[in-house]
Image (spheres, rainbow, N blue to C red):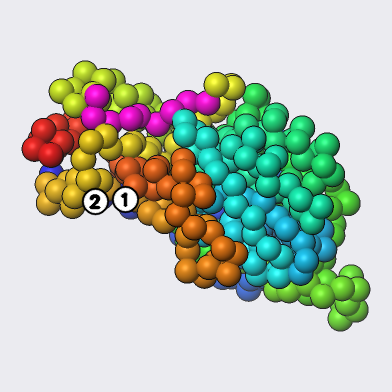
Amino acid sequence: MQISILDLRPQFNSLKDEILKEIAEVCESQRFILGPKVENFEAMMNDYCHTAATVGVTSGSDALIISLMAEGIGPGDEVIAPTFTFFATAGAIARVGATPVFADIDPVTFNLDPADFERKITPKTKAVIPVHLFGQCADMGKIMDIAKSHNLIVIEDACQSIGAEYNGQRAGSIGDYGAFSFFPTKNLGGFGDGGAVTTNSEERGKHLKRLRNHGQGSTYIHEEVGGNFRLDALQAAILAIKLPHLDSWTEARQHNAEEYRKLFSASKIADRVILPGLANYPVRHIYNQFCIRIVGADRDKVKAQMAELGVGCMVYYPLPLHLQACFKNLGGKVGDMPVAETVAKDILALPIYPESTTEMRQYIVECFEKVLSGC
Ligand SMILES: *Cc1c(COP(=O)(O)O)cnc(C)c1O
């Protein structure tokens, strides 16, 4: 059996006629930049994320950048982020000229450790970017309390967590800003790059809309320097077709995760893998990834042997950000973030996409039995 970590074709095939019709409509209209398709999708996002305003932008990375820009965060300012996340979380901080300050993660959820976040606060700290990694919300109750008591802006990196919930609240509706990505591998994926910022402040929404269009108030009158951060009408049109299906795809992912849990627990190698941990606060986990941890074997060897058996697994993420060469100037060193450094060595993501089958999961767990028994 050949199983890749993600196969996007079944989803496309199930919506093909509708999507091609919608693309044709945008082509006929010749309205490619912003306009009614983008506005329609933004309104749908407000409903889905329980927010007052959504601003469609070019990517999840730009959603983070434009949120930082909106708060005037730049040189001399510090922004705290977890060291274990996709690079863009910290890249955005550096791109606006501010200094990323890294904090360690919780070993169960892989999300920002609130206690370490609090320890990293200095008089220069302006904001924090908690990441809802792999589809599960960070400990937002504690993070919001700490942020409020230090007057910090909270930008939720919800790029992997559209529709996830913390204590009944949707990702992107809890902090001051929520950053979303529609990169094709996210749970709601476009046909190219795309992103959005959500906020519960109409005021902030207006400001973001101006910033994404070169800070333009009225045509060719610029009140501040923004950029070109506009979401394409074509992407918005495709995303608007997909969004009504997102909950059923999420349910399929949750079902697949439960099946993995049962299969691994009943297997001969139940003690050789740590299954994805659930938070000790109420969450809706949307399983953008299903990441296990390998016990007592070399993760990279296990991954290579699984590939030989036809199973595509991935490592998110092999090197914490405080150890990346591009952040050498910040002085991070091995041993600074023990939890993230350990997890980076043993974590492994398995196929979890909605259309993956029970047969595939049975085969995958059998392969782990073979591989781990030999290690
Ligand atoms: C995907 C992702 C981003 C960036 O999104 P792009 O649309 O690829 O720019 C940022 N943060 C996290 C956690 C992500 O997973």
Is 307 displayed left or right of 116 in the figure? left
Rendered residue at 19%/32% (across/down)? 365
Q: Kindly tell me whether residue 91 is visible in this rendering.
A: no
Closer to us: 291 or 39: 291
Closer to us: 210 or 37: 210
The picture quadrant where one finds residue 48 is top right
Closer to us: 327 or 219: 327
Q: Amino acid at mark 1?
A: Met
Q: Mark 1: few, some, or many residues within 10 Å (few <14, many ≥20)?
A: some
Q: Amino acid at mark 2?
A: Asp
Mark 2 — residue? 300
Image disc number at residue 314: 1
Closer to us: 257 or 236: 257
Q: Position of residue 182 (x, y in %)?
A: 54, 55
- In this rendering, the label closer to the viewer, 2 or 1: 2
Extent of the magenta region? 271-279
Farthest bottom residue in view:
220
